[in-house]
Image (tube, rainbow, N blue to C red):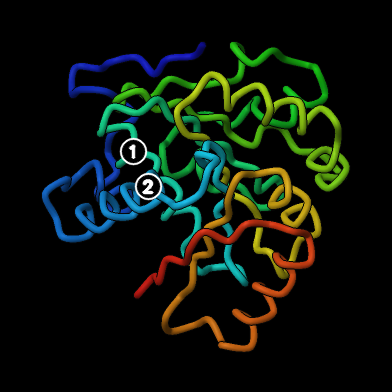
Amino acid sequence: MKRLEPTSKGLQRLNYKGSLITYSNSDSIISDQFRTIRTNIKFLPGEKKERSILITSPGKGDGKSTTSANLAVSMARQGEKVLLIDANLRDPVIHTIFKISNQIGLTDLLTRKSTFNEVVYQTGIGRLDILTSGSTFLNPAELLESDNMTSLLSSVVNSYSMVLIDSPAVLKSTETRVLANQCDGVVLVVNRRKTKLGKLAESRKLLDLVDAKLVGAIINKK
């Protein structure tokens, strides 16, 4: 596994302030809201415990990647072993938020160019690991809809308490709908100022069509 090495000013990965409020200000109201979301997910009703959660949104720019990152940090700081996967192969953001390399990642793992241990990052934030999107691939849908992706999800849920997947917008990407069907649950991030009710309803309909389990929605106020 790859580690980010300490520097004289502390761990070089940690200069978040803007994006990772759950790390930079764990006592804030927003951080407390993420802890509440974590608790709600942990105690969702039903016989099967949700171990893999897909995080998506109706459109681009709704804040789902920032939400995914903060939720992952919040869970990890509560002692859970968490894997955050950036499955947004068309427009990845997670590596930027955490300030880590994206030279290799999910695409390289799925094409068998690298092993899991070679591509996963240990952040040092609790027990949070990150699998970035990886090198550019011309047909993201082909990879994310492959048997290799199915096998990966089946494998990592046995190694982690929670697997969070940051995916493309559900209205923009067919592969998101495929992944939604493979995960235990889906969380929809909605931008209060931007998301139209019609788009929200359309997103819910598409998730229902692929038999995805929508476990809740997060309203992003920014």
Asked if the residue at tag 1 contacts the one at tag 2, i.e. Cβ–Cβ closer than 8 Å, the answer is no
Q: Secondary structure at mark 1?
A: helix
Residue sitting nearer the eye, 199 or 222 = 199
Q: Is residue 25 left or right of residue 87?
A: left
Residue sitting nearer the eye, 147 or 181 = 181
**Residue visible at 31% across and 48% down in the picture:** 39
Q: Farthest left residue? A: 27
Q: Residues within 10 Å of mark 2 (few under 14, many from 20)?
A: few
Coordinates of residue 12 in the picture (x, y in percent): 31, 26
Mark 2, residue position? 43
> Mark 2 vs mark 1: which is more N-terminal?
2
- Amino acid type at mark 2: Phe
Q: Residues within 10 Å of mark 1 (few under 14, many from 20)?
A: many
**Residue visible at 30% across and 42% down in the picture:** 74
Q: Which of the 4 image quarters holds residue 131?
A: top right
Q: Is residue 43 left or right of residue 62?
A: left
Residue sitting nearer the eye, 215 or 112 = 215
Q: Is 211 rendered above or below residue 1?
A: below
Coordinates of residue 59 in the picture (x, y in percent): 62, 71
- Amino acid type at mark 1: Met
Q: Farthest front residue? A: 47
Coordinates of residue 172 in the picture (x, y in percent): 74, 67
Q: Secondary structure at mark 2?
A: loop
Quadrant, the C terminus: bottom left
**Residue visible at 45% across and 52% down in the picture:** 45
Mark 1, residue position? 75
- How far apart are the two marked residues, 2 and 1, measured between alpha carbons? 13 Å
